[in-house]
Image (cartoon, helix red, strand yellow):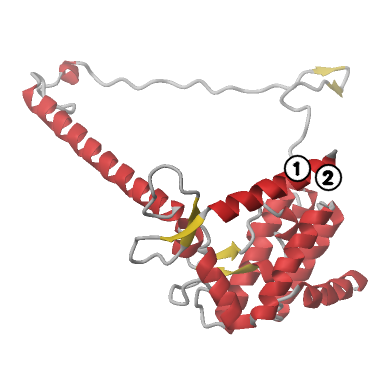
Amino acid sequence: MGKKKKNKKRNHMNTVIKESVLIPCTEPDCETEFRWNGKGIKPKRCHVCENRIALERQHKAAKKYQEKRRKQAIERSKNSKYGSGRGKESIHANYPKTKTRIKKQIRVKPQVHNFEVRTETNALPKKKGRSWTELPTNQLITYVQLKVVNPYIRKRDKDVYDNHCISCNTGRIEEAGHFYSVGSTPEMRFMPEDIHGQCHHCNSLLGSNPKGYNKGLIARHGQRYVHELHKLHAECQKSNTKLLRNEIIEIANTYKFLSKEKIWVFTSEEFNQYLNDVERA
């Protein structure tokens, strides 16, 4: 039954792709092409440009609303009887300022026969100076991604490619962007061939700029490198395996070693060689 459902989905997707038509985006700066199924009104822009224009409209409307509210507040303060602020004409001018006394609260731990009784406040002592390896698994993954892997990728591409973004080749490297997103394939989130240095405009505002990202990969590493990346993505989707906790810690230690020694790695095969050496050490 599972194979029949998968075949039906594939046939449906193939028919949708055959019926659809490739349309170029009308925006001058955008060179992307997207598919349209021929139903309804023909779109002029891709979804990335539509989202950007919608955000710009929202920002303009918010600024207009804030200016309107500010003008209304100024008019109210001018027309009010007592004016704005706390001056001679205000209501509170005749009242003297009083200082509020704050009582110091002294906590006393209850004791019975020289044995300390545990309460809610002192039941679990706080762990000071906890190591990153003791974090929960979800927090450990984000820590390794943001504090270990991404800084290594930025440092690598700044040194090798003169601080140029892989997608536009003009912006400076500010972030580390994934070619295949972490949401679609979390198994590839730590792989060096899937992460490269990008500017903030391409990574955040243009949704990783996949068309420019693909061109940059071909220009830097060649068509075979991109083919191997697609092949690795297909294998990860089929296996659907999750990284274990000890594997995440070993990967983080390997990236720290590579960053300290300034060894730049671009494929998983090269990374695994150093991973085995760090494990033996």
Q: CA distance from mark 1 to mark 2?
A: 51 Å
Quadrant for the C terminus, please: bottom right
Give whichever of 273, 263 is nearer the camera.
Answer: 273
Q: Quadrant of the N terminus?
A: top right
Q: Residue at x 89, y 69 (%)?
A: 279
Tell me which label, 1 or 2, sits earlier in the chain: 2
Q: Check the image and report above or below for 167 versus 136.
A: below
- Residue assigned mark 1: 127
Residue nearest the viewer, comparing 101 with 53: 53
Q: Is residue 104 left or right of residue 92?
A: right
Q: Quadrant of residue 271?
A: bottom right
Residue 213 coordinates in the image, percent (x, y): 55, 69
Q: Callout 2 environment at 10 Å: few (<14), some (14 to 19), or many (20+)?
A: few
Q: As rendered, which of 122 and 77 lies closer to the eye? A: 77
Instruction: Name which residue type carries label 1.
Output: Lys
Q: Name the disc covering residue 249, or none.
A: none
Query: Which numbered tag is attached to residue 3?
Result: 2
At label 2, which amino acid type do we have? Lys
Secondary structure of the residue carrying numbered label 2 = helix
The picture places residue 149, in percent across and down from the top left corner, at 68, 65
Please name the residue shown 18% across and 34% down the image. 68
Residue 92 falls in which quadrant of the image? top left
* Image vertical order of residue 221 relative to residue 198, above or below: below
212 relative to 249 in the view: left or right: left
- 37 horizontally vs 96: left or right: right
**Residue at position x 81%, y 42% in the image:** 4
Q: In front: mark 1 or mark 2? A: 2
The answer to whether 281 is drawn above or below residue 142 in the figure is below
